[in-house]
Amino acid sequence: MRTRNSFLQTLLLVTTASISWIACSGDDGGWTDADLTVPKGYGLSAGTSTIYSTSSFAFDSEAEWVTGSLKKRFTRGDKLYDDARTSSNGYGGGLGPVYAGYSCGSCHRNAGRTKPALWESAEGSGNYGFSAMLCYVTRKNGVFFQNYGRVIHDQAIYGVQAEGKVHVQKHYQTFEFPDGDTYELCYPEYTITDWYADSIRPEDLFCSVRIPLRHVGMGQIMALDPTEIEALARKSNYPEWGISGRCNYITERGKRQLGVGGNKAQHADLTVELGFSSDMGVTNSRYPEEICEGQLQMEEGSMMGLAYDQLDISTEDMEDVDLYLQCLGVPARRNVNNKTVKHGEQLFYEAGCQLCHATTLHTRTRGTTLLNGTQLPQLGSQTIHPYSDFLLHDMGSEIMGVGLNDNYVSGLARGNEWRTTPLWGIGLQETVNGHTYFLHDGRARNFTEAIMWHGGEAEASKNKFANMGRDDRKALIRFLQSL
């Protein structure tokens, strides 16, 4: 749990532009955009949830409307999110027998993207108890392996064998822009060793590694108006650009729903319960069985003192984590009046980037309902700027012979299809997490590489960027850094 200096945050607002937030006096005590005055040089990102922090806590601070009992629950959810879980039974325990991370914050440092072990060594599984990566595996016909499930859990409590260890081999290739400048791309190729059960031959395996997503705008994403997203899908047909986005529909909680969360829009909610279960091995009311149920790690865990006769976390605790995530503020856009940033924004549109990275969306009137029934109407009726249409797009399979195709199917999403990544907050990732690794597995080490990995439906826009002059390419990246 971190302590934030509210005085310094207030001082930042005052010194930036002698402006303060004004509480709404409406009958419902809510907030609207009309109650906000935006400091000079900033731009609203998420309506009344916009905050003006540019520190390492820019992703990890509550919106201004989070007060009173909401603030108490936010603080409690923050603690549950960050505190390391142990293998002991009872409150704060339940870790294991196998796991991928020992807390939500271990992979989502400061509610962002913990630096992936991919770039630390060839041992992708890391040496410090977590890898900040999830490794999804299937047979080549899409069926899960009986002894492993959908994710390889590469960590385990003392005395228990992990399911396997992930390794990476990096392949590099240098390319040239038309103006003669060069850039390098890195393709990571993964292998798995130390299988706890029968080894799986590489030729029988599809393996997709993901690094954590930024937890920016989670509440707004949950409050998106699905009819607007579906309308965007109907409109998303730009043959001159080769773009045609589509919705992903998945079944969660027994109901077919529009997917908006995750790399492939494969989730309709924030998957708090799934995260506790699959990532940490913490049983709960939605997932009461251990993730290694039926595997030898169950017996090994028992020998190390684990008990399986009770759930490891309550629904009420999980809802506080859900509340924490949905009450997080969204960093405002910065340097909006800067000449280079404004030029970069113009180039962003000229390259057609906004056709997928939609600049403006709206949340539904009623806001959101948390996993245990608590309602957050404060997230309703907001104009937001996530820079995403939340649709699936073919991102190509050609670059370095593989492109971004991971061969992993999620709902209706094929291996070459990915949800348009929301760009809000992306310019602060280096400040919050100390790195600029982008895309689903962190293979892009900077903005230029991230753009140049775009293929498929983004090929035309990528080529527009490639054919810009050096200064124009830098200006477009300066715009991205302002988001």
Image: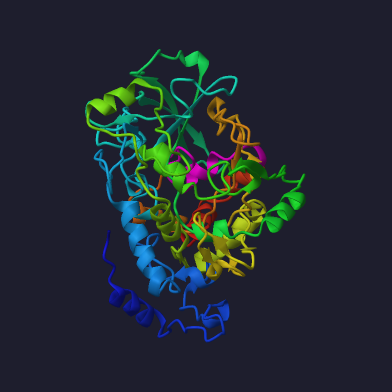
Foreground pick, 248 / 284: 284
Q: 75 or 403: which is nearer to us?
A: 75
Question: Is residue 250 shown above or below 197?
Answer: below
**In this picture, is 121 found above or below 83?**
above
Residue 164 picture location, percent across and down:
35, 23
Query: Depth check: 150 or 479 in front?
Result: 150
**Viewer can see residue 337:** no
Image position of 140 with respect to 371: above or below? above
**Residue at image coords 45%, 74%:** 65
Q: Is residue 321 above or below residue 284?
A: below
Q: Which residues are magenta?
A: 438-459
Q: Is residue 447 located in the magenta-colored stretch of the structure?
A: yes
Measured as percent of width and height from the top left, residue 376 is found at: 52, 66
Residue at position x 47%, y 74% in the image: 41
Residue 136 shows in the view = yes
- Identity of the residue drawn at 67% across and 55% down: 226
Does 99 appear in magenta? Answer: no
Where is residue 367, by image quadrant?
bottom right
Quarter of the rendering occupied by the N terminus: bottom left
